[in-house]
Amino acid sequence: MKFVDEVSINVYAGKGGNGCMSFRREKYIERGGPDGGDGGDGGSVVVVADESLNTLADYRFTRNYRAQNGEPGRSRNCTGKSAEDLVLRVPVGTTILDEDLGEVLGDLSLAGQRLVVAQGGFHGLGNTRYKSSTNRAPRQTSPGSEGEVRSLKFELKVLADVGLLGLPNAGKSTLIRAVSSARPKVADYPFTTLVPNLGVVSVEAHRSFVMADIPGLIEGASQGAGLGIRFLKHLTRNRILLHVVDMAPYDGVEPADAALGIVRELERFSPTLARRTRWLVLNKCDLLDAATLEERRSAVLDALDWSGPVYTISAIAAEGTAALCGDLMNYLEECRAREAEDPELLAAEQALQSRMQEEARDRVEELRATLRSRSDDDEVGDDDDFDVEVEYRE
């Protein structure tokens, strides 16, 4: 299945049915009076978050969606049938934007959440509505109003508590394989991960969190190098970021330089995201002797001017991963408990995520505009070129 995290579509709500002009005509009944009924309401377009979906691939080829029109009114005061709403199902974590206005219409972060994106037209009135003591034979009716028309953009950001950040081949996919049942591709060459992968990390009974592995960054990603920064937006929903550093890189690059390069790219992408809670994870430490490891560890901490948590692990041997996951679980539970007690903290967190997503959206659009200016190919930056499915695995 194609992994698609952005699509643009057009939605058309249904028109309201027209009112009917009719007069009662029955044998032996003189001057029966008006009996034209109202029309029916047009169908609205509703977007619903569905937890069984994990990609927007269903919207890749069909870009226009029309709700049905309401039926016109009939004689004998019969009201026309209202049209049913057109329901569009999207994965949980989808943001809906109005492309013409540049506004965010809603963020569907909960399963079953609904958002009316195009309101159906209001029904027209039949001539019965206009009768009065002075107007006993009205010939007025009103037409149904037109439904709303919108150009929408769907943006999917995977829902995860912990996000993995680092260079290609830093061991992010190996780490998520070690702590969950997710099985992303792992190989001895860069860019084996082409789309985000999700895994459910179970610490103990009834205690678990979701970890996201996104494709690796390289120096110059903010200018379009490698896979660029397209997938960094998926980190804007994460509560905490794990900066994974390869302590024994195959290409001889100093770990301190590699770690600093990632931080610079993150700051260019979104200054707010760069200030997000971030833990440092030094991976592949089993390949180094104690002296070399300590030397490189000190160099990384000095280069980053690091004062936060640091974990030394070997993802492939699952060494140090249990302590890391346990601390992550405790941190996430503390955050949830504080927000449950203080609604203002929850509101501040939601506002922070919105700001990060806005910065991410602006930066991605800026990069795409730059890339398009370098090439006459309108397909630069297309989102439909990746072939791996994202799924939650427990």
Image: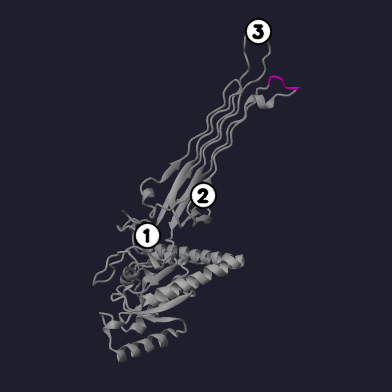
Q: Nearer the viewer, residue 327 or 358?
A: 327
For marks 2 and 3, the one nearer the N-term is 3
Dot 1 crowding, Cα within 10 Å, few <14, some 14–19, many 20+: some
Label 2 sits on residue: 114
Task: Please provide percent x and percent y for residue 34.
Answer: 65, 20
Q: Which residue is mark 3?
A: 28
Question: Can you give x and y, in whole percent of width and height, for residue 56 in the image?
Answer: 39, 53
Quarter residue 80 falls in: top right
Q: Is residue 337 above or below residue 155?
A: below
How far apart marks 2 and 3 lie (CA) works out to: 53 Å
- Crowding near pointer 2: few (<14 within 10 Å), some, many (20+)? some
Secondary structure under the numbered disc 3 in the rendered image: loop
Q: Nearer the viewer, mark 3 or mark 1?
A: 1
What predominant SS class does the magenta segment belong to?
loop
Q: Is residue 189 above or below residue 35?
A: below
Amino acid type, label 2? Arg
| CB-based contact (under 8 Å), mark 3 and mark 1 | no
Depth check, front residue: 14 or 2: 2
Q: Amino acid at mark 1?
A: Tyr
Q: Which image quadrant for residue 188?
A: bottom left
Can residue 370 be seen here? Answer: no
Q: Which residues are magenta?
A: 133-137
Q: Quadrant of residue 144?
A: top right
In front: 285, or 55? 285
Identify the disc placed on residue 231: none
Alpha-carbon span between mark 2 and mark 1: 22 Å
Question: Measured from the top left, where is residue 255 in percent x and y?
Answer: 33, 83
Secondary structure of the residue carrying tag 1 is loop
- Label 3 Cα neighbours within 10 Å, binned few <14 / some 14-19 / many ≥20: few
Position above or below: 379 against 190: above
Residue tagged 1? 392
